[in-house]
């Protein structure tokens, strides 16, 4: 049974069509990265899969139609890291990451020792243990990005949706975050659906890539099949060189002649 199944997904926002009949299947344990130029509909697709946009009949998660999942049950299945999450004023890093344990805490109850242990483990793994008492507002963009990922990982969901997870990170923390996600995927059978702008990094981690343009899927396949000079020139209007790499194709922008 697929982890994610999207069939003929149409989404319009403010009267403008964003997605126009998207189909997508993601196997359990697979890492699929969605790429495409600005405005292609990548973030909208992730929001629809995560239940943040109304698409109850077009999306199924692990064999259950999205519309049939209660919000609490959905939160145990899917965790989303948005590009710019809303952060409550004055909230500490520890309290924010603890929000990821909300689906497991009874109404009017408090977090358990197991909840706290899960949070501290994730903070340690993401090099955030020294930040737990800090307010999020005092952190740099890259530090906040790691905190947003920590909350999603603390949630313990089996499907992880990452919308530009490394956009605010330096190259060292980019690698740390993506390696951690891949390690957790191997250890716990996570399924990952991500959007990314850095095509070389995307190709190094994805099992499969989906290229969106104008709200439609225009290519899908392995990174080597999707990251071609011809496809990138056509849909990104970019001049690039694609060089075979150890883990995937490396995309190098070059000046137009």
Image (cartoon, rainbow, N blue to C red):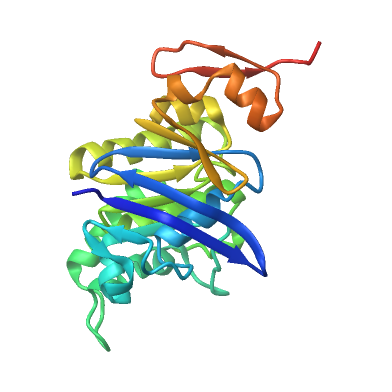
Residue placed furthest toward the right: 257
Give whichever of 191, 68 is nearer the camera.
68
Q: Position of residue 247 (x, y in %)?
A: 39, 18
Q: In which quarter of the image is the C terminus?
A: top right
Give whichever of 18, 253 is nearer the camera.
18
Tally of numbered tags? 0
Q: Where is residue 32 in the image (x, y as percent from the top left)?
A: 38, 39
Which residue is rendered at x = 55% and y = 68% of the image? Answer: 86
Residue 81 to residue 201: above or below: below
**Location of residue 57 by image quarter:** bottom left
Visible residue check, residue 114: yes
**Location of residue 72 by image quarter:** bottom left
Q: Where is residue 87 in the image (x, y as percent from the top left)?
A: 54, 68
Which residue is rendered at x = 55% and y = 54% of the image? Answer: 19
Which residue is rendered at x = 77% and y = 15% of the image? Answer: 255
Q: Is residue 155 left or right of residue 12?
A: left
Residue 186 to residue 257: above or below: below
Give whichever of 231, 85 is nearer the camera.
231
**Location of residue 97 by image quarter:** bottom left
Q: Is residue 11 left or right of residue 104?
A: right
Residue 109 to residue 85: above or below: below
Q: Where is residue 133 in the image (x, y as percent from the top left)?
A: 45, 64
């Amino acid at each position: 049974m697929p982890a994610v199944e999207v069939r003929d997904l149409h989404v319009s926002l403010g009267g403008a069509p964003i997605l126009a009949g998207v189909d997508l299947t993601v196997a359990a344990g697979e890492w699929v990265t969605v790429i495409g130029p600005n405005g292609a509909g990548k973030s909208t697709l992730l929001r629809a899969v995560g239940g943040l946009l109304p698409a109850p009949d077009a999306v199924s998660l692990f064999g259950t139609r999205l519309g049939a999942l209660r919000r609490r049950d959905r939160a145990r299945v899917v965790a989303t890291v948005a590009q710019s999450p809303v952060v409550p004023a004055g909230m500490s890093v520890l309290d924010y990451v603890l929000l990821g344990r909300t689906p497991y805490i009874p109404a009017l109850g408090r977090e358990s020792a197991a909840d706290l242990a899960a949070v501290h483990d994730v903070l340690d793994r993401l090099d955030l243990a020294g930040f737990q008492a800090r307010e999020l507002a005092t952190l740099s963009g890259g530090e906040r990005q790691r905190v947003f990922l920590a909350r999603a990982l603390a949630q313990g969901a089996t499907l992880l949706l990452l919308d530009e997870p490394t956009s605010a990170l330096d190259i060292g923390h980019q690698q740390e975050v993506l390696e951690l996600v891949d390690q957790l995927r191997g250890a716990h059978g996570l399924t990952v659906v991500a959007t990314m702008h850095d095509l070389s990094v995307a190709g190094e981690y994805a099992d499969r890539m989906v290229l969106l343009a104008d709200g439609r899927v225009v290519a899908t396949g392995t990174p080597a099949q999707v990251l071609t000079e011809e496809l990138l020139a056509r849909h990104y209007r970019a001049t690039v060189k694609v060089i075979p790499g150890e883990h995937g194709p490396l995309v190098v922008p070059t000046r137009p002649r």
